[in-house]
C-alpha cells in the first residue's frame, strides 16, 4: 500500500510542475513514506533523515526539504518535527494536501497534517496516467479488527471502502495507461463492500469485464471476511489469479485468542480446504508472528505443525515487535530476543522448505508469464507466473506481454522458463 501511496504522491507533485530527481542526493524535496508496523521500520526513517542531510553536507549543497509521510507521521506527528526538524509531516489520509503543505513549510518553516477524513484524499488526486504492466489499486483502507499487537487501526484509521464506481474508473485508467494486471489493495481487502452489498467478488466481476486487463489479484485478506462469493470467484473468474494471501499469524488457539484474531486454527484450516476445493492449484500465502507475549515453546510448535499442514507457496514471518499504545505491548510474558530469533529461524526454514517444494512442483508445467522487466542478461526478461513466482526467460517479448512459458528449472526463489507460443493479447 505504501508503494501505491508513493506513486500517487509522485503523480500529485508532478501535476504541480515538479519532476522526479534522479536520486535523493540531487532532490530539492524528499518525501519519506514510512511504515509503523514494526519498530525497525519506524527507526529507519530517522536514520534515513540523517543520511540525507549528511549526503548534502558532503556534496556541499543545501539540505533538501524533507517531508515525512505515512504511518510514522500519523503516529508520531509533532514529535518528528521536534526530533528531526523535518519540514512537512503528513499522515496517510492527508497526503492529497502535500503540495499545500510544502508551500506552507517553505513560507513558515514547517507544516503538519495528520487529519483522517475518510476517503477524501482519493477524490483530490489526479487521474492515473502512468503505470507498469502490474499496477496496484487501493480499494479499502483502515481496520476495525484491533488485533492486540497491531498499530494499523490507529494509524490508518477505521475500515473504509472506496466507492465502486471510483475504483472501476481508476482500473480503466490504469488499463488505458498500460496495466495488464491489477492488484486490489486493502488492509483487509476482502472486507471491501458497498451499500448494494456487492462484495469484493462483485468488484472483481466488474474488473473482469474490462477489456485489456488480463489478471486480477488482491491482498491482504482476513480469514473472517473470506466469503463464499469470493471463494467461488476463484473457481469461476479466469482473470483472477490462483493466489491467496491469508495471514493466520500463529497456529495455537490460546495465542490466536490473545491476539484477538477471531479465527482459530481449525476454522482457518477448514477455510483453506474450501478455497482449495474451488481452486485446487491455488498458491497459499500468509503472515506469521513469532514470540507473541506469553507464547510457550509448545504453542510455537503448533505454528510449525500448522505450516506443515498447509504447505504454503510463500510467506512473510516476523518477530513480534511491541508497538506503543497496543494492548500486547503491556502484556506479561514478553519473549526474550534470543528465543524469538530461534523460533523465527525454525519457522523460516520450514517456510523455505515448502516454498522450494511448491516451486519444484511447477517444474515441467506450461503457464502464462506477464513480462514485467528486463533481466540482467541480454535478451533475458523477468515476469510473474499465475502463482506469483518470479520467472526468467530468454525472449523477444516486451514488457507488458503475456507469454506461454514452460518451466524448465525451479530454484527456491525463482523459476527459469522457455517460451512456447505467445498468448493471445
Ligand atoms: N490486515 C492484515 C495484516 C496487515 S499488517 C491481516 O490481518 O492479516 C501485516 C503483517 O504485519 C501482519 O499480518 C502481521 O504478521 C505483521 N505485524 C503486525 N503487527 C506486528 C507487530 N507488532 N509485530 C510483528 N509483526 C506484526
Ligand atoms: Fe492489524 Fe490486520 Fe489485525 Fe487489522 S486485522 S488489526 S490490520 S493485523
Image (cartoon, grey):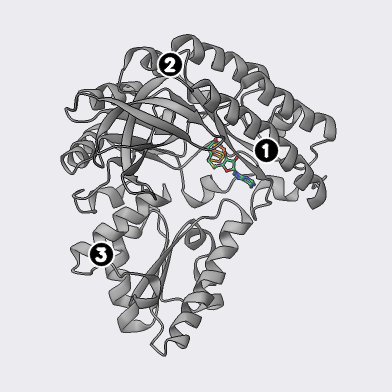
Q: Are marks 3 and 1 in contact (CB under 8 Å)?
A: no
Q: Is residue 5 left or right of residue 261?
A: left
Can residue 389 be seen by looking at this rendering? Answer: no
Q: Secondary structure at mark 3?
A: helix
* CA gap, disc 3 and disc 2: 39 Å
Q: Are marks 2 and 1 in contact (CB under 8 Å)?
A: no
Q: Residue at the spot x=45%, y=20% of the render?
A: 364
Residue placed furthest toward the top: 277
Around disc 3, counting alpha carbons within 10 Å, would you say few (fewer than 14), some (14 to 19), or many (20 or more)? Answer: some
Q: CA–CA distance between discs 2 and 1? A: 28 Å
Task: Indicate which quadrant contains ligand 2.
Answer: top right
Provide residue 138's location: percent of width, then percent of height.
35, 41
Dot 2: what SS?
A: helix
Distance of label 3 from label 1 (alpha carbons): 40 Å
Ligand 1 closer than 8 Å to label 2 CB: no
| Image mark for residue 13 | 3
Q: Residue 303: where, in percent of width, then height?
A: 72, 29
Indicate whether 350 appears above or below 107. Answer: above
Q: Identify the image quadrant of the C terminus.
A: top left
Mark in front: 3 vs 1: 1
Q: Is 311 on the left or on the right of 173, as rendered?
A: right
Quick check: can you spot residue 24? yes
Q: Which residue is mark 1?
A: 348
Residue identifier under label 2:
231
Amino acid at each position: 500500500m505504501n508503494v501505491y501511496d508513493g506513486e500517487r504522491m509522485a503523480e500529485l507533485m508532478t501535476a504541480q510542475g515538479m519532476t522526479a530527481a534522479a536520486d535523493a542526493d540531487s532532490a530539492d524535496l524528499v518525501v519519506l513514506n514510512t511504515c509503523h508496523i514494526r519498530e525497525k521500520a519506524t527507526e529507519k526513517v530517522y536514520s534515513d533523515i540523517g543520511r540525507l542531510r549528511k549526503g548534502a553536507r558532503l556534496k556541499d549543497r543545501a539540505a533538501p526539504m524533507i517531508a515525512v509521510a505515512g504511518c510514522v507521521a500519523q503516529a508520531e506527528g509533532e514529535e518528528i518535527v521536534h526530533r528531526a526538524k523535518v519540514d512537512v509531516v503528513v499522515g496517510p489520509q492527508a497526503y492529497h494536501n502535500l503540495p499545500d503543505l510544502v508551500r506552507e513549510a517553505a513560507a513558515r518553516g514547517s507544516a503538519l497534517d495528520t487529519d483522517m477524513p475518510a476517503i477524501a484524499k482519493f477524490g483530490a488526486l489526479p487521474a492515473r496516467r502512468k503505470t507498469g504492466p502490474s499496477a496496484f489499486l487501493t480499494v479499502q483502507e483502515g481496520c476495525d479488527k484491533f488485533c492486540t499487537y497491531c498499530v494499523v487501526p490507529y494509524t490508518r484509521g477505521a475500515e473504509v471502502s472506496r466507492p465502486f464506481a471510483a475504483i472501476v474508473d481508476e482500473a480503466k485508467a490504469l488499463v488505458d495507461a498500460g496495466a495488464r494486471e491489477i492488484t486490489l489493495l486493502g488492509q483487509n481487502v476482502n472486507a471491501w463492500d458497498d451499500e448494494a452489498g456487492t462484495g469484493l467478488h462483485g468488484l472483481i466481476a466488474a474488473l473482469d469485464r474490462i477489456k485489456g486487463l488480463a489478471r486480477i489479484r488482491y491482498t491482504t485478506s482476513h480469514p473472517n471476511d473470506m466469503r463464499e462469493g469470493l471463494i467461488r470467484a476463484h473457481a469461476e473468474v479466469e482473470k483472477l489469479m490462483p493466489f491467496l494471501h491469508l495471514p493466520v499469524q500463529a497456529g495455537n488457539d490460546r495465542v490466536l485468542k490473545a491476539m484477538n484474531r477471531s479465527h482459530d486454527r481449525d476454522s482457518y484450516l477448514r477455510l483453506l480446504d474450501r478455497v482449495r476445493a474451488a481452486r485446487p492449484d491455488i498458491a497459499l500465502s500468509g503472515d506469521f508472528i513469532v514470540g507473541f507475549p506469553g507464547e510457550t515453546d509448545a504453542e510455537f510448535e503448533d505454528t510449525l505443525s500448522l505450516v506443515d499442514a498447509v504447505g504454503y507457496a510463500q510467506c512473510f514471518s516476523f518477530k513480534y515487535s511491541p508497538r506503543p499504545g497496543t494492548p500486547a505491548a503491556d502484556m506479561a510474558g514478553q519473549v526474550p530476543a534470543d528465543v524469538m530469533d530461534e523460533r523465527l529461524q525454525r519457522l523460516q526454514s520450514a517456510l523455505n522448505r515448502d516454498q522450494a517444494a511448491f516451486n519444484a512442483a511447477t517444474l515441467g508445467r506450461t503457464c502464462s508469464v506477464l513480462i514485467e522487466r528486463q533481466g540482467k542478461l541480454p535478451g533475458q526478461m523477468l515476469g510473474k507466473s499465475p502463482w506469483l513466482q518470479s520467472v526468467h526467460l530468454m525472449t523477444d517479448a516486451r514488457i507488458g506481454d503475456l507469454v506461454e512459458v514452460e518451466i524448465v528449472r525451479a530454484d527456491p526463489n525463482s523459476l527459469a522458463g522457455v517460451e512456447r507460443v505467445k498468448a493471445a493479447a
